[in-house]
Image (cartoon, grey):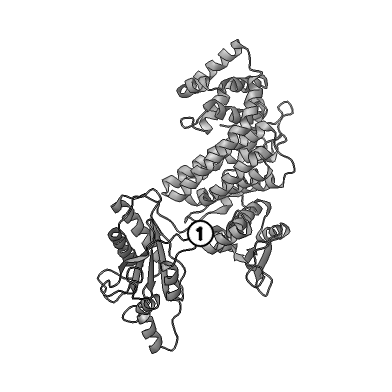
Amino acid sequence: MIAAIKPAGTNTRGLLAYLYGPGRHDEHLDPHIVAGFAMLGMPDPGRNPDPTLTQLAHHLDEPVQLRNSEFGKKITDHVWHCPVRAAPEDRHLSDSEWADIAERIVEAAGIAPPGDDLGCRWIAVRHADDHIHILATTVREDGRRPKLHGSGIRVGDACRQIETDYGLRQLKKGDRTAGKRPAQAEMHKAQRLGWEQTSGDWLQDRIRAAIPHASNAEELLAYLEADGIAVKPRRAPSGDLLGYAVGRPGDLNKDGKQIFHPGGRIAPDLTLPKLKARLETTAPEEHPTARREHPTTPWHQATDALDTLHQGMTDDTHAQARIAALGELIEATAQTAPDDSRAELRTAARTFARAQRSQIRAEHQAAHTLRRAARDIAHTATGPDGSTFAALLAALIWATIIAARWHEAKNHAHQAKAARQALHHLHTAADHALAPVVDALAARRPSDQASRTLAHDVRAAVPDHADRILTDPAWPALATVLADAEAGGHKPHQLLKEAAAQRELTTARQPARVLLTRIQHTSRNPAPNPRAEAARQRTTMGTSPDNGAPASQTTIPSSAPARHRPRR
């Protein structure tokens, strides 16, 4: 059940005309009052032909008129309007049930507190099976204004209890981080102009798409302006940026002037201070990705960066920052992905936007590496090869699962749901991207003898999941990857153990594919050199026994060329 409190209005008679009228598409049937502040003697133009809408409006406005006559400053924002709608699958509710629901909502809101005979005047009008409209005038019988601060939260809590009491569809409790719902006027305007999205939604997509391209707020606004979006910055006399608003081309008011939307009204995390906090961070992450000594691409770097996401999830402020940066990485990946995967990834990025914010403050420095990876991908001119792209998508899937689990653990119901929905689109994109990679690898599968030896490695390294891996349709492709890695000097048994340790396989739909992308990504690195590792250890531990100099200054013997440190 959804109760949507509207902005304060000024015209009681005008709202009544809509409630008792035919509706915009003749959808209003049998409008009548089901509940009110004093049903005895209440004029109801819907069921009684004698009262008029003007009489009913005057009846509701009496406390307002009395107060206005006594005080010099008149009250005009006195019309409280709250539609209350049941879910489509909910059962039919009777008038008496809707009356009880209306009374509980006005009590929760503070319009008519329980046991208070001097509350505001209100009515609940029903003109359809699935919803009512509550109208109240916000001056009490004693002339005071009601205390409505926080009424949205209280009404939401009342709706959750009503759902339980009446056996209706259970919605999740909100946390005041949701974006602003489009008004009906905005939706009608978009429909009239042939737009698929309202201006607010369209602008939100453009701002989020621009974030990976910018390193500060000024760059972000410049990028938006270059993209054809109308930008109106608000500056101090010194020239410092204090705020901003953006406008969609062609979105004009009745006077033909551009309509602007402040960033904070488009989405709670798009205010200027929050954008600055995300964009203008330079501190390295607590657990940076290991430096590699061979050439790599932004796509490989992004996959490496995702390997560290889980390491900071025990600190809530770090976890929130990493999840926000994960959304930016999904967006950047969508922008430079192959054409046949772009639509699914864009939908995943749009859906994940709800999972990027919660009421937990984010320590954005903790996500510097992830954000830098997103920026590098956004600025790259060429796309990835098939196996590299598949590995990144697999890493994004696992990172999104981690994000969903974190939100679930924190009881962030809406964010967890958004992450799970984004996961569906990521899976679809990954299935499409990995299919040709798997086919190409399976076409050159190793010999039967080599496959049996590799199967033995699987059973030794991941015994709990060996049967599922070896019966997975992608096993021949995984066997090829393991054989290639072994030819490059790696040990298949060790690669399997490391890959399984990085991503639990219990919930994996196709464990062989999960291991395939992970091992293919890892085994691109040169095989570990024991002598080089020993030399590296000498340079990073203690001091030189010869002269007491820091060990980092010790020379590595030429016979043991430095290589990257193997993962542990």
Residue in the picture at 58% in, 59% down: 200
The front one of 529 and 99 is 99
Image location of residue 511, percent across then percent down = 52, 27
What kind of residue is marked 1? Arg
Residue 81's place in the image compared with 75, above or below, is above
Image location of residue 64, percent across then percent down = 38, 81
Q: Using residue 391 as the reference point, say whether residue 55 is left or right of it.
A: left
The front one of 120 and 331 is 120
> Residue placed farthest to the top in the image?
449
Residue in the picture at 65% in, 28% down: 436
Residue 335's place in the image compared with 509, above or below, is below
Image location of residue 306, percent across then percent down = 58, 40
Q: Using residue 43 as the reference point, say whether residue 447 is left or right of it.
A: right
Which quarter of the figure is the N terminus placed in? bottom left
Mark 1, residue position: 181
Residue 565 in view here: no
Which quarter of the figure is the C terminus placed in? top right
